[in-house]
Image (tube, rainbow, N blue to C red):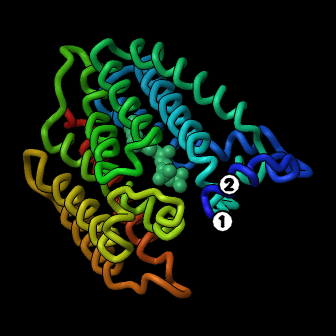
Amino acid sequence: MPIDQAAEFDAQPRFRYGARPVPLLGLFRACHPAPAMVVAVLATALTALSGRGATGCALAGLAVLSGQLSVGWCNDRVDLRRDIAAGRADKPLVTGDIRPAAVSVAAGVALAACVPFSLGYGLLAGTVHLVGVAAAWSYNLGVKATVASWLPYAIGFGLLPAAVTLGLPGHPWPAAWAVLAGALLGVGAHAANVLPDIEADTSAGVRGLPQRLGRRRTRVLAVCALFSASAVLVFGPAGPVGAAGWAALAFAASLSGYAVAAPGSGAGGRTPFLAAMAIAVVDVALLLLRGATLA
Ligand SMILES: CC(C)=CCC/C(C)=C/CC/C(C)=C/COP(=O)(O)OP(=O)(O)O
């Protein structure tokens, strides 16, 4: 559906508020629950591994969770017109399971909660986290449709290690390898996340970096960024690489080869996306393995 017909479509009450809307489930689905949980659990685990006590871990977890929820809700709310135009039946706002106003309020409340949780974890650490959240909101509010669409991801994920370590006694900055790995992981996650929606996004007028590169080159970008993150996480920290490091690198390399070579359309069309996600899982595991040496 052309974007100019979307407003008319949006105005149809039966479409917007389906016969049996399930508001709480709709609200839950609109927050991008899977990535929000993964990022919050990752941040909490890194906080625990770096030695902060239970209160610090709880504050870090709540700060990152509320930040991610705000970003997820804001994203679906801002994208409503485009998602309708693209016929995104996976979006609860499009199917009418939740009202736009409820999602706007939820995004605002989550963002407001994120501020005290972040600053409660640590003044400097919290400020750094809020910069990452602001970068993510900038993505939602327009940067996603520009050639710099990767930048908010690089900033948000690159700053995550600093948002953890600056809350430790002495407020140490993280090691350079941790920042670089986070940024690469963010860029790879962006490219992989957009991969399945490139055509729909392009026809809705979203021209971020992946849509400009096209399906094939975006796949290569996702794999290069995610595999580079693996390499940085294996070779970056001081000390021997160890058997686990070599094994993870070999596994990430074979997944990378598979992701690049797999057919991008037809029955196996989602294979490159799934293989890229598997490399991201290896990266997260490596990050957790190095969690005690972030600073
Ligand atoms: C740690 C931290 C603060 C990082 C955040 C970085 C960041 C830019 C996150 C955006 C997350 C998000 C809701 C993407 C949806 O993208 P989309 O609209 O392209 O995809 P969709 O069609 O699946 O909604």
Residue visible at 43% across and 67% down in the picture: 195
User: Picture quarter containing residue 232?
Assistant: bottom left
Q: In the image, 114: left or right of 94?
A: left
SS class, disc 1: loop
Q: Residues within 10 Å of mark 1 (few under 14, many from 20)?
A: few
Residue labelled with disc 2? 6
The residue shown at (31%, 79%) is 260
Residue 11 coordinates in the image, percent (x, y): 78, 46
Circle 2 packing at 10 Å, graded few (<14), some (14-19), many (20+), is some
x then y, percent, for residue 286: 28, 52
Dividing the picture into quadrants, the one containing residue 264 is: bottom left
Q: Which mark is residue 179?
A: none
The three-letter code of the residue at mark 1 reads Met
The extreme right residue here reads: 19
Measuring from the top left, give residue 213's x and y in whole percent.
Answer: 31, 68
Residue, x 54% and y 19% (percent of image)? 113
Q: Quadrant of the C terminus?
A: top left
Considering depth in this image, is 29 or 17 the residue closer to the camera? 17
Instruction: Kindly identify the residue that appears in the image at 31 percent across and 50 percent down.
Output: 150
Q: Which residue is mark 1?
A: 1
- Is disc 2 placed on a helix, strand or loop? helix
Question: For the residue marked with disc 2, what is the amino acid?
Answer: Ala
Q: Give x and y (percent) for residue 23.
A: 80, 39
Q: In the rendered structure, which disc, 2 or 1, sits on the residue that comes first in sequence?
A: 1
Whether residues under marks 2 and 1 lie with C-beta atoms below 8 angstroms apart, the answer is: yes
Asked if residue 241 lies left or right of residue 43, the reply is left
